[in-house]
Image: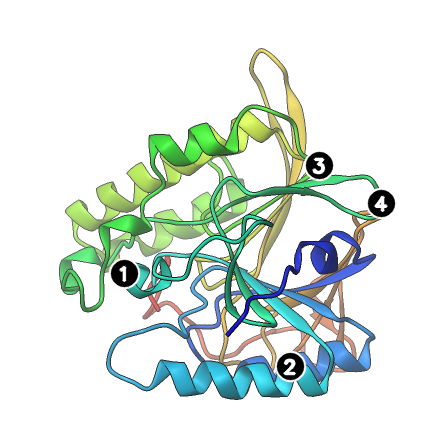
Amino acid sequence: MTPRTGCDTLSAASRIGFLGDTHGDLEHVLIVSRTMHARDIQTLVVLGDFGFIWPGHNWDNVLDKLSRRLTVTAQTLYFVDGNHEDFTRLYRFPLTEDGLRWLRPNIAHIPRGWRTTLASGKTLAALGGANSVDVGHRREGTSWWPAESVTEADLATLGNQHANVLIGHDAPLNVPSLDTWLNETDRWWPAAGIHYSAAGRAMFHRGFLQVGAELYLGGHYHRHFDETVDYDGDSPFTTRVVLLDKNGSERAISQAILDTNTLHIEYFTRNDQTVSNKYIIGVDPQLDSKADDAAPAGES
């Protein structure tokens, strides 16, 4: 297989479709792909926990099937890594000249620290990875890989240059709505897992501060959050922090479209119901009646 250079596909897009954690859920991705296609979206980005490369199932054939379906809709799918990827297998795919890992001609991994300039002239940077709060229940090389963690090398690759948009998996610190929810769900996890997860988030936050983006898009927490936060420091800045929900629900806000010119975000359910002000038009305001409290904070 000869990888194709897809950097121009992402850079040239005036509108980009984003998905929260997909966890290897082919049905979910295909539904969202069709919905995005109906809205003339050709570029898709999964915000971590892509999950299609995973031990114990025929992931190679599944990727082939996904690639064929994306070919029919003329779409290209990119993803940043999360904390639930088989990094051993993922890193066997080489980086190409555009800095991406092409798993298939229309499926690419965006490595940590990758940057591009969008068609609008705005800049985009990527910083995937996160620490698994449920690490104590996982086995190295089977369901957990140390490479999930953001490293000093990742931060060095990212650099200190400003970017208008940062995409990743984890979340920056000091997001009040997220922090309140995490405080309410800490009871589900052992102290060691909470400490490990918090250390990963603090590491990601350092990269977040290096970039100082106006907009951050991530996933990981299996909830939708959208909050504008002021950050102090030597160079204060304000960021709109957007986290998308995960796969599996017809009603969750787990997908969105970004206008790269205005940085306006349009939310909708995977079956194409428009979402406005966190309410689905014509549907009960409770977005997802199935509470996810049994699987909080980054558990797949």
Other-residue count near label 2 (Cα within 10 Å), few / some / many at <14 / 14–19 / ≥20: many
- Which residue shows up at 16% across the image and 53% down it? 190
Q: Earlier in the sequence, mark 1 or mark 3?
A: 1
> Left or right of 298: which side holds 106?
right
Q: CB of mark 2 within 8 Å of CB of mark 1?
A: no
Q: Secondary structure at mark 3?
A: loop
- Is residue 103 shown above or below 213? below
**Residue 70 badge:** 2
**Residue 164 badge:** 3
Residue placed under numbered mark 4 in the picture:
120
Residue placed under numbered mark 1 in the picture:
88
> Left or right of 145: which side holds 177?
right
- Kind of residue at badge 1: Thr
Q: Earlier in the sequence, mark 2 or mark 1?
A: 2
Q: Secondary structure at mark 4?
A: loop
Q: Secondary structure at mark 2?
A: helix
- Kind of residue at badge 3: Asn
